[in-house]
Image (cartoon, helix red, strand yellow):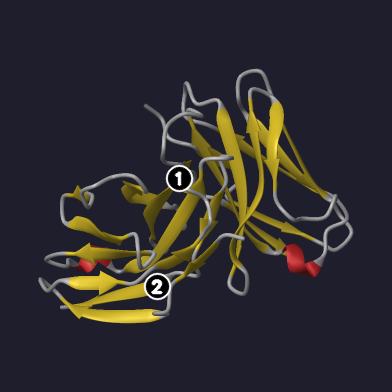
């Protein structure tokens, strides 16, 4: 069974631009969560989608948004990028009833 | 509010020795799950072990065991017979059952010395 796939692996953007990150969950998993990891703040929850609906949302500004498609693939969008958005963005999937999260390798976003 | 505390920023252990990574948590939820993840330099978070708050016995997964002390709100990870490949960041996490949201500690960097 393929794992959680995140694309792209690395991304370089400039301030003010927008970016879209993609996540394909493990087959059969209906819940997709996104986390931001920075050296200063650690791992912080962004949001979770289940069956195309946002089920939980963390404490991030509205510039961070996401969506989930009918095949459970998810995208995360960040508009008007700021230097502080530089981070590793991790996607994780689960069946929705399983206990553990399965993570992808992440997208390393650098904002210049 | 939920909070996970890992007080050891960095740890060193000799190869083949055992090591304990500390984790304490704070929650008022009656039911929750506790997890440990390993993050090597490649970035991927790898699940190691899970403990439910109502589980009577401590969880074990191969060389990993979780020392769960509910009254003290601690969930320490014990790695037996350390290997060089165990060198990585280790994160303690808690999942609330009221929502599929995980709270992570700040991590402990483990270095295994040959």
| Apparent side of residue A78 relative to residue A106 in the rendered image (left or right) | right
Quadrant of residue B86 within the rendered picture: bottom left
Q: Nearer the viewer, residue A46 or B32?
A: B32
* SS label for mark 2: strand
Chain ID for label 2? B
Please give the label number shown on residue B31.
1
Q: Quadrant of the C terminus of chain A?
A: bottom right
Q: Nearer the viewer, residue B85 or B94?
A: B94
Chain ID for label 1? B
Q: Are marks 1 and 2 in contact (CB under 8 Å)?
A: no
Number of marks: 2
| Image position of A89 with respect to A95: above or below | below
* Other-residue count near label 2 (Cα within 10 Å), few / some / many at <14 / 14–19 / ≥20: many
For mark 2, what is the residue? B108
Q: Nearer the viewer, residue A104 or B67?
A: B67
| Apparent side of residue A12 relative to residue A16 in the rendered image (left or right) | left
């Amino acid at each position: 069974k393929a794992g959680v796939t995140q694309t792209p692996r690395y991304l370089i953007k400039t301030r003010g631009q927008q970016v879209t990150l993609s996540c394909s969950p493990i087959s059969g998993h209906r819940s997709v969560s996104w986390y931001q990891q920075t050296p200063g703040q650690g791992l912080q929850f962004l949001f979770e989608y289940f069956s195309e609906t946002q089920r939980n949302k963390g404490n991030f500004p509205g510039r961070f948004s996401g969506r989930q498609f009918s095949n459970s693939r998810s995208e995360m969008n960040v508009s008007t990028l700021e230097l502080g958005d530089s981070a590793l963005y991790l996607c994780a999937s689960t069946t929705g009833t399983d206990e553990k999260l399965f993570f992808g390798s992440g997208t390393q976003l650098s904002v210049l | 509010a939920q909070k996970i505390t890992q007080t050891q920023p960095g740890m060193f252990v000799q190869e083949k020795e055992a090591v304990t990574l500390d984790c304490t948590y704070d929650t008022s939820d009656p039911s929750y799950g506790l997890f440990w993840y390993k993050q090597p330099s490649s970035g991927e978070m790898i699940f190691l072990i899970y403990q439910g708050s109502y589980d009577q016995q401590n969880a074990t997964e191969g060389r990993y065991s979780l020392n769960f002390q509910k009254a003290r709100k601690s969930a320490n990870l014990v790695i037996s017979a350390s290997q060089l490949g165990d060198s990585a960041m280790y994160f303690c996490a808690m999942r609330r059952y009221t929502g599929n949201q995980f709270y992570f500690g700040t991590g402990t960097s483990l270095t295994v010395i040959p």
